[in-house]
Amino acid sequence: MQRLGDVSATDERVLIATGRYIGEGFDDARLDSLFLAMPISWKGTLAQYVGRLHRSYPAKREVIVYDYRRRRGIQVRAPLQGVQIGAFTVLAPSRARYVRLIPDLDKTPQSYASDSASSLGGILTNVFKNVVEKIKESLNLETLDTNPPATSASNETSVVQIAAFGDKRILLTGDVGPEGLDEAAAYAENISFSIQPSLVQIPHHGSRRNVTPAVLNRWLGPYPGSGRGDAIASIGKDQDGYPRKKVANVFTRRGYDVYATRDGWVNFYYGYDRRPNMGDASIIPFTQM
């Protein structure tokens, strides 16, 4: 606000922000134009946004709202199973599963370590897990949990989509968990889409909750494998704990080179020349555990 206040009253200004950040409770009386780049579902929210412009100011003569979606005839559709978004086909969530998950969207799952520990079954399960943890992983021995604690309902509503560009297939997974990945695979198979991707996003930064050996066998093929494609995990700076080593290992076993965005963005190119001054991204090596 201090920087906005320092702008001269005679200077033009352009303010770019999200609706949640300045859509309500924000006041700069000099603003007179609003550009809507995304649709808004509730008219009350739109009234709040437009209300930011209806502040009296001596030089203000009119208020203008530009609705790009309507002006350009852009159709807005819910990103549910079967919808086409450009080259991408939405595989999950289905409308039925999304509706089923709605009541749990605000719930936070238990921590990975504490899940089900209070019951006898949970205690026995944890004993088994502790034994498994002591077994060292190798390229031929996988110890990723076959039935991990459930990820959040919010994660399970993530949009899973796939596209084909020539002989290359890209699978985007967001933060989805095993249930959503299974639903997505079933739908892709039902529409006769060859599902083994050339490039796959590792779900939810590489969390152990979000993939299982079975669901990855379905998508990527069983291990051992080689030269099947690339896998990338979206990781924030200094997040050295992700992707989890066991998760990176399961992709490596199935023939995927694993990358992370921890140190910057990663460019995969196909059908055009490599960008100048680009270096090679580092592949995350298999970790003996």
Image (tube, rainbow, N blue to C red):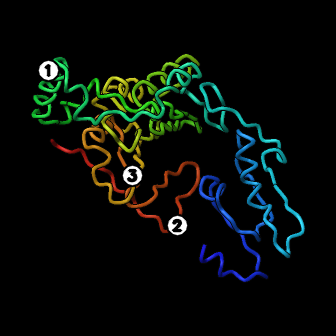
Above or below 116: residue 255: below
- Indicate the position of residue 64 as horizontal and vertical percent values: 85, 59
Find the distance from the CA under tag 2 to the CA under tag 3.
Answer: 24 Å
Q: Nearer the viewer, residue 252 or 84?
A: 84
Q: Quadrant of the N terminus?
A: bottom right
- Indicate the position of residue 199 as horizontal and vertical percent values: 46, 40
Q: Secondary structure at mark 2?
A: loop
- State left or right for residue 9 relative to residue 124: right
Q: Residue at x 81, y 54 (%)?
A: 66
Binning the other alpha carbons within 10 Å of mark 2 as few (below 14), some (14 to 19) or many (20 upward) gives: few
The mark that comes first in sequence, 3 or 1, is 1
Three-letter code for the amino acid on which mark 3 is drawn: Ile
Three-letter code for the amino acid on which mark 2 is drawn: Pro
Binning the other alpha carbons within 10 Å of mark 1 as few (below 14), some (14 to 19) or many (20 upward) gives: few
Above or below 120: residue 195: below
The mark that comes first in sequence, 2 or 1, is 1
Q: Nearer the viewer, residue 219 or 28?
A: 28
- State left or right for residue 9 relative to residue 238: right
**Residue holding disc 3:** 235
Find the distance from the CA under tag 3 to the CA under tag 1.
Answer: 34 Å
Q: Residue at x 44, y 22 (%)?
A: 182
Find the distance from the CA under tag 2 to the CA under tag 1.
Answer: 56 Å
Q: Nearer the viewer, residue 238 or 264?
A: 238
Give the foreground label among 3 and 1.
1
- Indicate the position of residue 181 as horizontal and vertical percent values: 44, 27
**Residue holding disc 1:** 124
Give the foreground label among 2 and 3.
3
**Residue holding disc 2:** 276
- Indicate the position of residue 78 as horizontal and vertical percent values: 66, 32
